[in-house]
Image (cartoon, rainbow, N blue to C red):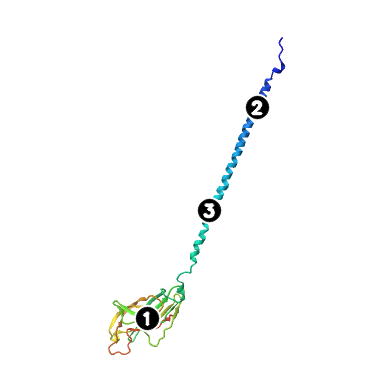
Amino acid sequence: MTLSTPSAAVPASLLVALSLVATACGGGQHRSGADRSARGRLPASSPTSSPASSRTSSPASSPTSPAATTGSPTSAPPTGSAAGGGSCGGQLHLAVQGPTGAAGTIVYTLVLTAGGSAPCTLDGYPQTVLTGTAGQVGPALSPAPGTTPAPVTLRSGQAATATVALDDPGIYACPSATVTSVRVTLAGVGPTLTATLPRSTGACTAASPGASGQVVPGTVTPLAVAG
């Protein structure tokens, strides 16, 4: 009869249990290593967020600061302010009304209307010249006898008038020419103003033979505020 040694026999169930334990330990070490590597890579994404925000925020606001200086040239005084200081240059409209008259006199009315937004002042005497198709007719009109010119101030839209009196060539039998328009100059105003007569007329270019005290070609009164 043969006898077996008890220490040489290992139960099969014990071997299976040991194998399962070893496998579990190895798998746990593999997962923990992957977790460590994953956790080690996470901080790599965090630095990318802060530099991006710092680069985009500070330069974006800097170009807007020079824009505030672009409005500085507009602080200069506006042009044309001198127009309110009494000058009517470039702001007047000339018109002629008529003719009327009797007893050998032809009468026209000069109407000067102020434009612009500020009051302006006119010299009281309108230097007036008659013109026709061939140019100037006779000398400039003379101031009406017994009148004294004075400056006239007009508001915007207000008018001043002056009366032109011409000797009728049909009555005075004087050398004459046809008048179709007038030119008016006012001291300190600037350009000469021109207006067409509502109806052309004859005007003496020289005194009638034997006439005394005849004013050729006629007279004009100082300006007066209309109405």
Secondary structure of the residue carrying tag 2 is helix
Q: Which residue is mark 3?
A: 60
Decide if residue 132 is on the left or right side of residue 187.
left
| Mark 1 / mark 3, whichever is N-terminal | 3
| Mark 3 / mark 2, whichever is N-terminal | 2
Could you say which disc has been placed on residue 99 in the image?
none
Which residue lies most toward the top here?
Answer: 1
Q: Which residue is mark 1?
A: 127
Q: Residues within 10 Å of mark 3 (few under 14, many from 20)?
A: few
Q: Residues within 10 Å of mark 1 (few under 14, many from 20)?
A: some
Q: CA distance from mark 1 to mark 3?
A: 67 Å
Could you say which disc has been placed on residue 22 in the image?
2
Image quarter hosting the C terminus: bottom left
In terms of image quadrants, where is residue 25? top right
Q: Residues within 10 Å of mark 2 (few under 14, many from 20)?
A: few
Decide if residue 25 is on the left or right side of residue 169.
right
Picture coordinates of residue 159, whole percent (x, y): 42, 78
Kind of residue sitting beneath label 3: Ala
Q: Residue at x 62, y 33 (%)?
A: 31
Kind of residue sitting beneath label 1: Gln
